[in-house]
Image: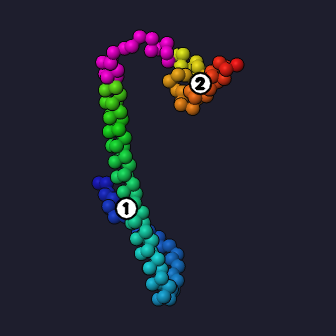
Amino acid sequence: MARKTSSRKSPKKKENIIYSRLSSADATDTKRNILEMEASLLAIMQNIESYKDLRKRELMWKIKLKRNYKNIDNNIKEILNLVPKTPNVKKIEIEHKERKKKGLKTQVGMNIESELMDIQNKLKEMNK
């Protein structure tokens, strides 16, 4: 018959362990430092968890914002389709853009001061 192997593990060889003696003050300082490190690690873990929660909420807000944006965009398109179209609007817009590029002011964009200047210039020309 074949011999069964035991499920026990063979004892490991003893390693050369070096012990050192610490004073009680050093031991308490070391324990205090270890406890402080554990406390700070736990605080870091809490911060990480709260960060994950904030990121989830941010993602939810972004999704809601995107959905609202799409709804608003669709509503604007519907309103624009319902509003009656005026003829020659494109032509007026193109003329306005061309005048703006040339540096000329359009009648729509003139302010009171520029109108006064124009009137004064016309009056000077008439007096000549």
* Quarter of the rendering occupied by the C terminus: top right
Number of the label disc, if any, that sits on residue 46? 1
Amino acid under label 2? Ile
Label 2, label 1: how far apart the Cα atoms are: 73 Å
Please identify the residue farthest to the bottom as the structure is shown.
24
Please identify the residue farthest to the front as the structure is shown.
127
Residue at left 37%, top 61%?
46
Percent coordinates x, y for residue 49 in the rendering:
36, 57
Mark 2 — residue?
119
Q: Secondary structure at mark 1?
A: helix
* Viewer-nearest of discs 2 and 1: 2
Q: Secondary structure at mark 2?
A: helix
Q: Is residue 10 visible?
A: no
Identify the colour scheme used.
rainbow
Residue 15 position (above or below residue 60): below
Q: Which residues are magenta?
A: 77-93
Q: Earlier in the sequence, mark 2 or mark 1?
A: 1
Percent coordinates x, y for residue 119 in the rendering:
59, 24
Residue at left 34%, top 48%?
57
Amino acid under label 1? Gln
Number of the label disc, if any, that sits on residue 30? none
